[in-house]
Structures are given as C-alpha cells and as structure tokens.
Image (tube, rainbow, N blue to C red):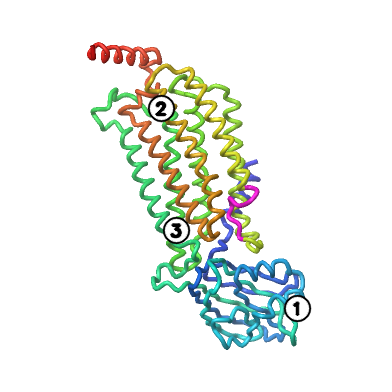
Amino acid sequence: MLRTLLPNVCFLLLLPSVEQTVLDGSYHGTGTGVIQYLTKFGVKEGSKVHLSGTISGANNSSAAVLCAFVPQMLWDQLFHNLTQCDSLAFVLSSYLDNSCKTKDSCFVKSVGAENTSFYPFLTSPYKTIYWHLIFIACHTNSSTLAASNDATFTYSIRLENDLSTVFYKQFSYDLMGIVIITMCSTGVASILFLFHVAVHLPLFKCWKPPSTKMHLLVRVYTLSPFLLIASQALQFAHWMIFATDGVGVPSLDHLGFALGGLSTWILVLVFVLLSKGWQMTTRVIRRMLLTLLVWGLYIIVSITLFVWSVVSEVVFPYMASPLHPYNSYEGWVYLSYRVLLLLYLLYELWHSYQQENNPIVMNVYRFFAVWFVVWFGYLPLTVALLYAVNLLEWTRVILSTSLFFDLAANFILIILFCPFWSDYYFQFNSHLNIIDRHTRYTILSLSEKSVAL
C-alpha cells in the first residue's frame, strides 16, 4: 500500500502552481484542444495590470494562435464554447485587436506567426474579478476564426500589478498580504512551541515533583504546534521566493498545506480524547473503536479536500468558476463533518461531565464545550458569510481566520498542559490517583469554609 500511496503523494507535491505570474514555456499545436490555459490573475476594480511577453522560435506559419487575457465574464462564455474555433468567433468578435493600436483594449493578440514582443498596459473596468491568460488554437480568417494546429513557438510572459512596491508586484489581488499572514503565524507558533517545550524541561526548580516526565497525551499534542510551524515556514518560504521570481517553489506550498493538515489531525485527536475525559476523569478511553472511527473519518474527508484543492487548481484550472476548495462538494462534505464531529464531542463531554465531581474539572468541561462550538463552528460560519463577499477575498479571509483559531487552540492547550498547574485538571502523575486528588480538593474546600465561619 505504501508503494502505491507514495508516488501519488509525490505527484501532488510536485504539481506546478496555477498562481505563477512569470511563465516560460513552449507551445506545440497538436490539434487536441482549442484552448491552452496558462494562469489566472486577480485584478482589483479600477486598477491596472502590466502584461508583457516575448514570442520566439516561431515556425513562420501563417496559421498563428491567439494569446488572450480575458476577464471572468468572457472566460465563462469561452468555457462553454471550447470545441471549435467558429463557436468562439462570436464570443471574441468585440475583443479582437490584432494590431494592438489601443493598449488599454489589447486583450487578444495573434502570436506565433513570427517572433514578436508585446507590452500592453491593461485597465480593468470591471469589478474585482479574475482575469485568465490563455492560448487559443485559432487564427483570424476574414471575419471568422479557423483552427491553427501547426503553430510552434516558445514564450516568456510576465504579469504584474500596478503597485509601486516592487516586492508585491508579482502578486495577484487575492494573494495580497499572504506573506505577512504566513510570517506572523510562523512567529506566533514558534513562540508558543518554544514556551511549551521550555516549561517541560527540568530547569525550573519550582516544578514539583522534578522527576515527572511529559505524559503521552502531551507528547502527542506537541507534534501539532511543531507541524504548524513547519507548515507556515514552508509556505512563507514559497511566497518569499514567489515575490522575487513570480513562480516560487510550489512543492513547498503543497507540502506546507499537507503538514498543516497533519497538525489539525493531531489537534482533533487531542480534542476527542479530552472530550472523553481521558486523564481527567478516567484513565480508560471509552469506546476505543468508535473513537478511532470518528477520527479516521475526519482524516479521510480532510485528505479528500486536500487532493481536490491541489488537483482542481493545477489539473483543472480552466473551470468556468474559480471555486475555492470550500465552495465545492468536497468542501461541503468536510464542513458538514466538522459539524457532526462537534455534536459527537459535545455528547462525550456531557457524558464525562456527568461522571465528574471535582468542580475545577467540571469547569474545564464547561469551557471545552464552549470552545468546541467556537473552533468547529467558525469555519462553516465563515464560509457561509463569505458568499456575500467577493470571491477574491476568500483566500485571505479563510487563511487568516483558520490560522487565528488554530493558534488560539494551541495557546489554550499549551496553557492547560503546563506542568505548574496541570495536576489540578489531569492525572498525569502516577503518584496522584483520582481518589487522592478529589480528597485533596475536598479537604481544601472544607478548610476554606471553616476559615469563613
């Protein structure tokens, strides 16, 4: 099974990125398709985008192809007429400007017949939408379009926004700020992880007893913030490189996305174990098989969403609507399962709460009930609210919101697992069993009452 799975994982990680804004490649007319998709670029309303390119190695064929940079509305029409050139002629009739006399309207240009360069400076008169860069295997023939299957050439095309800051000129509008988001999340996650590791080192003399070791539950959880750091660091490195060359290292981005998923899996596993009262009310995990099944299903729907998010953007970038992964069937399944998992955890919390008689631990259960509703419910609620927002805002909002709540969850667990006070909630120390712990709190409460009297 591993031999079958590993090549597929490597294939996903090595896929290129559809977000790249510097494109170098070659075009070979094979007659197998009318449109060759290159990339998409988010353009803010009223802003400008600089599209420049060089065509070389042309075979001097009279049957050139069309290089088109078209807005989303036109792309939706082209998408439904991909079969033949004559079906595209009516759609492109008002956009054809092969001479590029007016730079602001140079959306479609004939290329491939000879070596050429073009530097149109385009203004977006539409609302904030995606623009799509494509090659169309058709050439103008009188007032219609004819198929072009024998054109071959190499191209070098660059897309830039109109920002004065050189560092951000490569970025599409929907990716603005992603460098700051990943940098800040990497820094905060690193601080939390270092604090978590430091407080468990036997360097603090006030830690009693000093012989206590990190419990298995805490050690398993420690992987979550570590993987989160690795995830954000890899994505930060990708976007930093992307800012300089417009391509980045897509494998780092995909690997970072996968490690972020692993971090969330471990976080969910810890939540499931805490909801069952493990090491709080009981030392036995109730219904172990059901626990593994619930957690395993979460992993399956997460993997499905990850594969879809990578494949849909790279293998099927020409989809009529540039869907966000959460705005798809796979995304809806993932969001629905988060809600079902929330209901399951609330049931387990209620069951553990009924068995507990320590008021401090009971307060912890009440807190987790509220926190689970917040953590599992924020994503479906955010996606529902985003339907009223422009699609190009989805990436930034979902990324920043998800990282905020993941960091908040890690902060809560790191504080809860801190050895200075974890004995108040957990049975990590073998010398303190549940009876002794409850007896200690009973004596403490009785002494406080006697002092009050």
Tell me the mark number nearer the camera, choosing from 2 and 1.
Answer: 2
Q: Residue at x 39, y 71 (%)?
A: 165
Q: Residues within 10 Å of mark 3 (few under 14, many from 20)?
A: some
Q: Which mark is residue 364?
A: 2
Residue 8 % position (x, y)? 63, 50
Please say if 76 is above or below 226: below
Q: Which mark is residue 178?
A: 3
Please say if 425 is above or below 438: below
The residue at which mark 1 appears reads as: 147
Query: Position of 112 compared to 425: left or right?
Result: right
Three-letter amino acid code of the residue under disc 1: Ala
Q: Residue at x 58, y 81 (%)?
A: 106
Splitting the image into 4 quarters, where does residue 451 fall? top left
Front residue of 411/368: it is 368
Q: Residue at x 47, y 31 (%)?
A: 369
Measure the alpha-carbon separation of dots 2 and 1: 69 Å
| Image quarter hosting the C terminus | top left
Question: Would residue 97 be counted in the magenta stretch?
Answer: no
Residue 271 % position (x, y)? 48, 32
Give the residues drawn in magenta, as a range: 322-330
| Image quarter hosting the N terminus | top right
For marks 1 and 3, the one nearer the N-term is 1
Three-letter amino acid code of the residue under disc 3: Ile
Tell me the mark number nearer the camera, choosing from 2 and 3.
Answer: 2
For marks 2 and 1, the one nearer the N-term is 1
Splitting the image into 4 quarters, where does residue 59 fall? bottom right
Q: Secondary structure at mark 2?
A: helix
Measure the alpha-carbon separation of dots 2 and 3: 35 Å
